Image: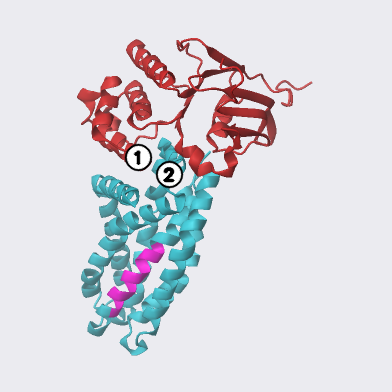
Amino acid sequence: MTAGAPPLFSGEDIACQRGGHELFRGVGFALWPGDALLLTGPNGSGKTSLLQVMAGLRPPSAGRLDWHGRDIREDLAAHAGRLHHVGHRTGSRAILTAEEDLLFWSRVRGPASRQRCLLALARFDLLRLKDLPVQALSSGQQRRLALARLLATPADIWLLDEPAVGLDRSGLASLEAAVARHRGSGGIAVIASHTPVELAEPVRGLALEQSGERVPEHGS
Amino acid sequence: MTRFFVIILRELRIGLRHLSDISAVLAFFALVATLFAFGVGPLALGDLAGGVLWTAALLAAMLSLDRLFQPDHDDGGLVLLVLSPVPLELVVLAKVIAHWLTAGVPILVLAPLLGFALQLPEGSLSGLLTGMALGTPILSLLGALGAALVLGARRAGVLTALLILPLVIPVLIFGVAATDPANGAAPVLFLAAMLLGALALCPWATAAALRQSVL
């Protein structure tokens, strides 16, 4: 895209092990402001693990990841501060109301503003449910609440692990609109999803394959 | 620093919405103490009361440890806390403080009543309360370490108790010693020293254990 400029967020020759066997190796990516990266691959190919490596939660067994050309492991706290990670589990506490939960996470991350939280709830059509405890929400609504965190506080990188699971059509549209706005303001989005998520071009792809190191499932 | 209090407030709010958890701890505390009273009989009870109350308090505190990190582990909030700008050690400390306020303090409040029921000698009450005021935070700190270490394991509650109860034997010894006015201030000072030691070490060890279990 921006030919010549060094990438903002990049990874080189990344390998990852889990439970003693190698999930993938030699994986690399390079992302510039406004880029989207779509992770694809069969179940068990390591999409979730790669997202955790990108978040700095899981150390790669080989390779490096750079932000502005500097290894993210030099300052993992700063790296965590510039990303949002939405995983399989939503992170919302069942007994809190939707608004309390969102306010809490935005206050912990900062800079928090109630206005922004309410706007985020509205964007995901949760405003009328804001005083309900999370446990009273359906799983799709809980997913929306987790996604609303993306809008409640700013972050440069969005790491989304199956963000569309359980979302209905309008929820998916909200997600796509949020990603488009994020990219429009120079943000980076990395998405692993089996549900097709419509993304504006250009979309970079990264396909993970079933690892060759794996023990054959059917004995010889 | 505000973020630190934000975490404490959230934990307190959750704790107060799960009032049954707090009352279960208190009921267990009262029940164990009562069992001792029936088992030992009225004649020997007065001398034993300090030890009985301390043992019952330790056992009751074990019941409350699984709510420290397990819910965050289950709902995925732990990942968000690890990724938050608050150092994980401070997150742990905030949770420990909230745990002490919702488990240690209620035990502390109930202790004089049970002491009265168990015929605790009159001069022992202030020693018991001072000792427990210093001892219950140690329980919360060590308990957090145990809860973090067993996170994700099967039968985690039993494992926590097995890990932590041996470690709190010194607290029990000095706590019971503090109930005897003849021992003077020495046991209380020992408890204070143990509290400072636990305060200095436990948050770091707990945070390290949490980082291991976050994935």
Q: Which mark is residue B85?
A: 2
* Residue A206 coordinates in the image, percent (x, y): 60, 18
Give the extent of the magenta segment.
B127-139
- Chain appearing in red on the rendered image: A
Crowd band around label 1 with a 10 angstrom C-alpha radius: few (<14), some (14–19), many (20+) = some
Q: On the image, which quarter does residue B136 sit in?
A: bottom left
Is residue B142 positioned above or below A59 on the image?
below
Residue B48 falls inside the magenta stretch:
no
Q: Find chain B in the image and tell me its colour.
A: cyan
What's the distance in space between the residues labelled 2 and 1, CA to CA? 9 Å
Q: Nearer the viewer, residue B197 or A154?
A: A154
**Residues at marks 2 and 1, common chain?**
no
- Per the image, the residue denoted by label 1 is A110
Quick one: SS at disc 1? loop
Q: Image point 29% across, 70% down: which residue?
A: B38
Q: Nearer the viewer, residue B117 or A59?
A: A59
Quick one: SS at disc 2? loop
Kindly indicate whether the residue at mark 1 contacts the one at mark 2 (C-beta within 8 angstroms): yes
Q: Image point 38% across, 28% down: which residue?
A: A150
